[in-house]
Image: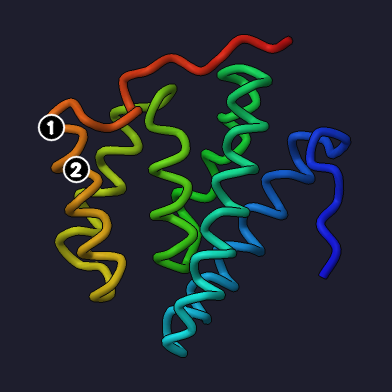
Amino acid sequence: MTDPDLKALTDEQLAQRFCDLSLEEYDAGRGNELKRVIRLARAVIAITRVLESRGADALRVLLPLLNHPNAQVRLDAARAIMPVEQDRATATLKALSERGPSAQRGAAGMALYYEEKGISKGGRPPRKRQ
């Protein structure tokens, strides 16, 4: 798979790629493909960083993903938008930590713990568009 130049994609294209990669990450996790999970998680983080560099409105294109049927998509989106939509992201993480599938339930719980302890990047405002 060839990765496109993420900076050349629109915010909407990045959101779609974010969703697609999160779905692949979910499938890889179910198949216990750790190397693939790590690669996909890093790709999701790369997209998040590009959106962060474009500002809060760019990150908000991920908001609809908080209602996605797949738990991994909701988890990734909640962690990504925490800096700009803390209440909505926290609500999604709480719901996942209470009722999500095992892997996402644990990850959501840890994300909430990191946020509570102040060791997450959630309170940090996104970088300004350059």
Label 1 element class = helix
Q: Which of 39 and 69 is in front in this view?
A: 39
> What residue is at 59 percent from the left and 73 percent from the top?
24
Indicate the amino acid at tag 1. Glu
In percent of width and height, residue 41 lies at 52, 58
State the image quarter where residue 21 is shown: bottom right
Q: Is residue 79 left or right of residue 110?
A: right
- Residue at 40% across / 24% down in the picture? 83
| Crowd around label 1: few <14 · some 14–19 · many ≥20 (10 Å) | few
Image vertical order of residue 77 relative to residue 30, above or below: above
Q: Position of residue 16 (x, y in %)?
A: 71, 53
Residue at figure coordinates x 82%, y 35% from the top left: 10
**Residue reaching furthest front?**
35
Quarter of the image where one finds residue 56: top right
Q: Distance between the residues labelled 2 and 1?
A: 6 Å
Task: Find disc 2 in the rendering and name its residue.
Answer: 112
Q: In which quarter of the image is residue 113?
A: top left
Answer above or below: position of 18 versus 5: below
The residue depicted at 86 percent of the width and 51 percent of the height is 4
Quadrant of the snapshot with the C terminus: top right
Residue picked out by circle 1: 116
Q: Which sits in the foreground, 21 or 119?
A: 119
Quadrant housing the N terminus: bottom right
Name the element at disc 2: helix
Q: Is residue 69 above or below residue 128?
A: below
Contact (Cβ within 8 Å) of mark 2 with mark 1: yes
Crowd class of label 2 (few under 14; some 14 to 19; many from 20; radius 10 Å): many
